[in-house]
Image (spheres, rainbow, N blue to C red):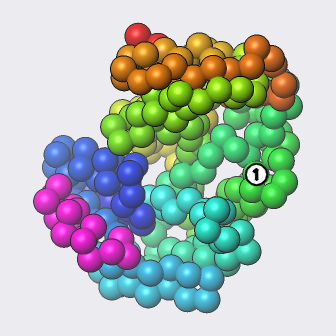
């Protein structure tokens, strides 16, 4: 089976490496020459793909695959708010052009606003403007397509190698909302859940890829800082806006078990 990964960043490279180790043919994209050479070292066939609001340029061989993973998050902090949806439009047109029938789109639990409640895949997302609303609209672009089936992975906050949570707030004080529950996922579970989608041919579903553990923010990040030997952060003992993101589809459809505890 051949899987192409559009966007081999932190998650995409790890996922591609795991698939290649299992004997899949894996094609990965980047816009950086340095990153392309690194992909080859992991057994990933490297391709330069440039997708923008106005066009998409790529070697057609990249889109010769059985399944395509679209892992291009919006770069809101870099001013991509207006360009993200048009960019995805070009990607979707290219998917249809090359007749790809199975797509995985990596979204975010940011489609759920902080509604002071628990949510799962059966809940109607109430995204906060502007970023959450754009993410939800992006999902709709894929969900409404009939030429292919899309599995949508709503990742929680990403932690793991290279994104050690102990560093996020180390030594800071007066951090608000210390009693709010966290919604996180490890890199290992990101990879494992995506592999399970492919193994179960579970396209056409939405999956909340988020750990079932939701300790308070203060408890989690203080423990993570202590484990890393970093100065402990200080949080305000308050509960403001929050949400708990659960999943019914990950255990029921994929039969996937999360790898371990967030706080050891």
Q: Which segment is the magenta one?
A: 30-46
Q: Residues within 10 Å of mark 1 (few under 14, many from 20)?
A: some
Asked whether residue 199 is in view, the answer is no
Q: Is residue 222 above or below residue 144?
A: above
Along the line of sight, the residue nearer the viewer: 66 or 231: 231
Q: Is residue 122 above or below residue 146?
A: above
Residue 228 shown left or right of residue 208 in the figure? left
* Position in image of residue 207 (x %, y %): 59, 38
Q: Is residue 38 magenta?
A: yes
Residue to which mark 1 is pinned: 132
Residue 44 shown left or right of residue 179 in the figure? left
Secondary element under disc 1, as helix, strand or loop, is helix
Q: Quadrant of the N terminus?
A: bottom left
Along the line of sight, the residue nearer the viewer: 193 or 13: 13
Q: Quadrant of residue 208?
A: top right
Along the line of sight, the residue nearer the viewer: 108 or 247: 108
Residue at position x 41%, y 24% in the image:
230
Residue at position x 54%, y 75% in the image:
91
Q: Quadrant of the C terminus?
A: top left
Residue 234 shown left or right of residue 211 in the figure? right
């Amino acid at each position: 089976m051949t899987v192409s990964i559009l966007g081999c960043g932190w998650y995409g490279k790890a996922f591609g490496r795991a698939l290649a180790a299992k004997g899949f043919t894996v094609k990965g994209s980047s816009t950086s020459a340095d990153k392309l050479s690194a992909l080859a070292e992991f057994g990933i066939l490297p391709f330069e793909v440039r997708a923008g609001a106005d066009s998409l340029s790529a070697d057609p061989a990249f889109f010769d695959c059985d399944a395509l993973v679209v892992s291009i998050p919006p770069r809101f902090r870099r001013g991509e708010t207006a360009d993200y949806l048009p960019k995805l439009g070009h990607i979707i047109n290219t998917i249809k052009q090359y007749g790809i029938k199975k797509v995985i789109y990596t979204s975010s639990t940011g489609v759920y606003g902080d509604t002071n409640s628990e949510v799962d895949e059966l809940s109607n997302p109430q995204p906060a403007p502007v970023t959450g609303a754009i993410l939800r609209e992006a999902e709709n672009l894929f969900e409404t397509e009939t030429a292919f089936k899309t599995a949508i992975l709503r990742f929680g906050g990403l932690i793991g190698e290279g994104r050690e949570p102990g560093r996020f707030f180390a030594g800071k004080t007066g951090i608000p909302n210390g009693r709010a529950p966290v919604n996180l996922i490890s890199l290992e579970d990101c990879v494992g859940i995506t592999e399970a989608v492919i193994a179960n041919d579970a396209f056409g579903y939405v999956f909340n890829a988020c750990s079932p553990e939701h300790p308070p923010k203060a408890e989690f990040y203080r423990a993570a800082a202590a484990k890393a030997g970093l100065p402990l952060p200080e949080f305000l003992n308050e509960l403001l806006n929050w949400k708990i993101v659960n999943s019914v589809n990950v255990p029921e459809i994929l039969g996937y078990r999360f790898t371990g505890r967030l706080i050891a």
